[in-house]
Image: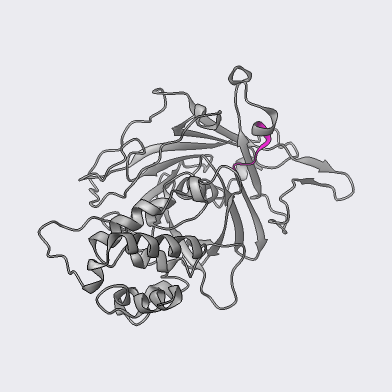
Amino acid sequence: MSFKSIVRELKEMRDGIGSLSRRSAESKHWHSRVKSHVVPDVTLNPLEPVQQGQWAHVPPELLLDIIRRVEESETSWPARTVVVSCASVCKSWRAVTKEIVNTPEQCGRLTFPISLKQPGPRESPIQCFIRRNRETSTYLLYFGLVPSENGTDKLLLAAKKIRRATGIDFVISLVANDFSRSSNTYVGKLRSNFLGTKFTICDNQSPHQAGTQPNAGNYTVGTIAYELNVLRTRGPRRMNCTMNSIPVSAIQEGGTAPTPTSLPQIIDEQFPLSPSLKGLVEPLVLKNKAPRWHEQLQCWCLNFKGRVTVASVKNFQLVAAVDPSHNLSTAEQEKVILQFGKIGKDIFTMDYRYPLSAFQAFAICLSSFDTKPACE
């Protein structure tokens, strides 16, 4: 039997992968522009019986070879769904798939939901785009260069803007139709002050705890501060991002950033806000890459390498702000860790790399959508 035949049979299995195909009502959201999402990475209740089909008895050697070949051949969405489907067949398939699938830092790919909380690749950035809906105050993060014509874009994260008396909340979820903090799809939030000049990134799990937690709350993993333009001087917005959960040593040779391995299962809305992790280690600080003034165009310019096409006050590139004592090379200091910019009406690109995760990068970009008259 050829490899393609094996994959075709896997897709058609009703007891296994077939339950996650487009014919299944439970996963019809896979190919929907708004509701397309990866199933949350949760552990089965040990009291629940596990349905084991005939594919659970595939010899380990053959199973390892099949999943390895699927992993190597399916590099992007929507074909990447086959890799996730393999992990949904049964316990043995899931164990082998999770063993083979690497983190975004290692392979540059997004697979399971937890990969959205793991650092991106060190070299080539992961390219995404954000679609803004002004009517519903929602922001959808998709994987890919630009929106597709057939509407099969892969939804990664969604955020909803909620106004409070003292500021703004951006609630971040794995899906676009459920922003409840009591849901398994809730992953964190971004909270602003009254002026919209300072923001706090809150994660629903501690980045320093790799395993699944019985309860999860809001952990302060980063803060974003926009400089006030009191003198009304000419220039773009200026921002500083202090990533409390990422040590500055992460960008040095041999350094590492926290890499969680699973998402929490239960969300407790009464869980108190944890104190900032800043102080335990020196945190990584990101700053705007300085633009240059173009005399002919009479505007500030940055080299976005074709990823940004529309001038906007929201456009930015972030690089590491490090003290000379860290002996970081000039190339590393100039490396763009996150860039964000406009390409059309309510369409923005977001490209991020190590040591930021998709969740952290998305939260930083969301801060740019809030109105900041005192900074411009």
- Observer-nearest residue: 176 or 254? 254
65 sits left or right of 250 in the view: left
Question: Looking at the image, how many numbered discs can be counted on the residues?
Answer: 0
Q: Position of residue 322 (x, y in %)?
A: 60, 25
Image quadrant in which you'd find residue 318:
top right
Q: Which secondary structure dominates the residues rendered in magenta?
A: loop
Image quadrant in which you'd find residue 66:
bottom left
Q: Position of residue 210 (x, y in %)?
A: 31, 40
Quadrant housing the C terminus: top right
Residue for point 54% across, 49% down: 365
Task: Let me know if residue 87 is in the magenta part.
Answer: no
- Observer-nearest residue: 350 or 368? 350
Looking at this view, name the residue that lies furthest to the left: 47
Q: Is residue 140 visible?
A: no
Residue for point 42% across, 27% down: 278
Q: Is residue 68 above or below residue 331?
A: below
Task: Let me know if residue 336 is in the magenta part.
Answer: yes
Q: Position of residue 230 (x, y in %)?
A: 65, 33
Quadrant housing the N terminus: bottom left
Over which residues does the magenta segment extend?
A: 333-337
